[in-house]
């Protein structure tokens, strides 16, 4: 049985965001963001976001957002629909 990742408190998320924006994404911040995005989709399995909506929701720069969404699609966690919305892949919930 797997456990869901816990979400970081707002202050820690803001700290990671500042680190990402100032220094660029690091391996640890990328891993943190992947965990956060996975947790959001597992919490709300019917979530359907465009790239721009995801970028706004998580306050990410365009290249970081693209990299995160692409990584989650590549591992089969998310699917990009014909209308370019990112959804949880069937069977993941």
Image (spheres, rainbow, N blue to C red):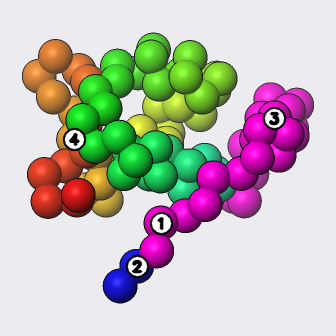
Mark 2 neighbour class, 10 Å CA radius: few under 14, some 14 to 19, many 20 or more: few
| Residue 63, quarter of the rendered image | top right
Q: Which residue is mark 4?
A: 79
Helix, strand or loop at label 1? It is loop
Give how far apart the Cα atoms at labels 1 and 2 are. Answer: 7 Å
Name the quadrant of the N terminus.
bottom left
Range covered by the magenta-colored residues = 3-28
Q: Earlier in the sequence, mark 4 or mark 3?
A: 3
Q: Are marks 2 and 3 in contact (CB under 8 Å)?
A: no
Give how far apart the Cα atoms at labels 4 and 3 are. Answer: 27 Å
Helix, strand or loop at label 2? It is loop
In this rendering, position of residue 82 left or right of residue 14 = left
Q: Is residue 66 visible?
A: yes
18 lies above or below 29: above
Of marks 4 and 2, the one in the foreground: 2
Q: Which residue is mark 2?
A: 2
Q: Earlier in the sequence, mark 4 or mark 2?
A: 2
Q: Which residue is mark 1?
A: 4
Mark sitting on residue 14: 3
Residue 10, image x and y in percent? 77, 38
């Amino acid at each position: 049985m797997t456990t869901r990742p816990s979400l970081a408190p707002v202050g820690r998320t803001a700290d990671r965001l500042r680190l990402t924006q100032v220094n660029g994404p690091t391996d640890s911040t990328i891993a943190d963001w992947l965990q956060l995005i996975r947790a959001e989709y597992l919490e709300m399995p019917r979530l359907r976001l465009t790239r721009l909506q995801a970028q706004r929701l998580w306050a990410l720069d365009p290249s970081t957002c693209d990299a995160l969404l692409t990584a989650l699609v590549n591992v089969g966690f998310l699917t990009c629909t014909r209308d370019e919305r990112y959804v949880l892949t069937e069977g993941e919930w």
